Image (cartoon, rainbow, N blue to C red):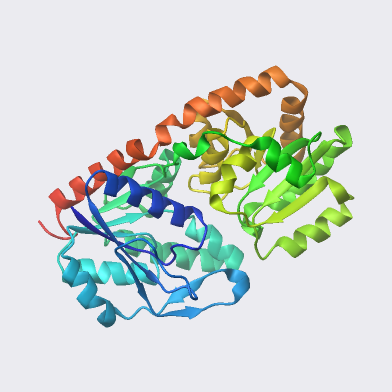
Amino acid sequence: MRIVIFSDAYKPIVSGVVMSIALFRQGLIAAGHEVHIIAPEFGNYEDEEPYIFRFPALDLPERLDLSLVIPFKTPMAPTVRGIKPALIHSQHPFVMGGVAAAFARDLHLPLVFTFHTRYDEYAQYYIPIAPRLAGRITEEIVGRYLDRCTRIVAPTPSIRDFILRVFDTDVPVMVVPTPVDLSMYHDLEPQRVRAALGVEDAEVLLYVGRLAEEKNLDFLLRAFARIVAARPQARLVLVGKGLHERGLRRTAQKLGLGGHLIFTGAVPHDEIPHYAAAADVFVFPSVTETQGLVLIEAMAAGTPVVAVEAPGPVDVLSEGGGLLVPAQEDDFAGAVLALLTEEPRRRALGREAAQAVQRYAVPVATARLLAVYEEAIAAGPRGKK
């Protein structure tokens, strides 16, 4: 099967969407399929993988770590038509997503779309003028896009239910979780990471992800202040970068967290398993995730999770491996303190976590995605009777 994936982002950008594309591509190729990616150029980055086609893009400010493809269909047409794909898989409803849908229509191909993001909520964070209106308009645009698809992929049951409830679409929505490369979780080196961070004797809490306002990190810092009051040896390690870092540093200073907080900046993705193994507890305050790939990555290292009860974490932790708590600072701090205090319970949850993530192995998730592709091809392009 030949598959064309359209995405607004690909390597070297590190994000959940990029990891999803890369890991599914790995699994599909291993299963004997041919996967082509249409993505924006990114600075001077050169791909080492075959079948990655880059097109001119606008360089956005360096702090955004993103480029935006110029969505002209004509220069892409010889490439897409020459591939002769069996289907098109879109990763976004905007920009490249629109181009993907246009090619699917023109070539009479099924269009599969993965619903990676709560677009309505993100619009409210990033469009400060009339955020509620922005959320409603975004919801309307996304709804129209869904109706152009043959199949919709949701990474969790909660997001499938959200799509069906909010958009009332008649397009089938199928659950396919983003996979994790479990082969990366052998021979972990937690002590090396602890030594590098200077936290050899500390109780380490870890967050991995963008330092962005929608990730609810101010909430995390306020909860952490309560944890530090009870456990002065606790340290919070924030792995990632983002526009909200300066604000977080100011909040940390006001809360008197000082040396209890460590900002690492971005780290290579192949180092994440070692960081996860170095933590006593992985903390996740976000309420806007469709899945939360970093949760699964932490659990694969045998690290228990404390997360705010929200779509994404609810599904990931459905088979154990951590604690879900209401979005209240005292509840969150109390759950973390309970695990720091009760080592046997913490270790048991860690073992549960390592077992629960087996369902996210690349071959397992890839088989589910292939089932979606086969259904989409059998159904044909949207509108075909």
Relative depth, front residue between 341 and 175: 341
Q: Give the residue at x 82% y 60%.
A: 250
Where, quadrant-wise, is the C terminus in this rendering? bottom left
Residue 295 x, y percent position in the rendering: 56, 40
Work out whether residue 257 can be spotted: no
71 with respect to 247 (left or right): left
The image quadrant of residue 277 is top right
1 with respect to 138 (left or right): left
Residue 70 x, y percent position in the rendering: 39, 80
Number of dots carrying numbers: 0
382 with respect to 297 (left or right): left
Q: Give the residue at x 23% y 49%.
A: 373
Work out whether residue 41 can be spotted: yes
Residue 276 x, y percent position in the rendering: 62, 39
Compared to 357, does 287 lie above or below? Answer: below
Compared to 72, does 241 lie above or below? Answer: above
Residue 188 x, y percent position in the rendering: 58, 35
Compared to 90, does 307 lie above or below? Answer: above
Q: Give the residue at x 70% y 32%.
A: 280
Relative depth, front residue between 75 and 274: 274
- Residue lying farthest top? 344
Relative depth, front residue between 106 and 142: 106
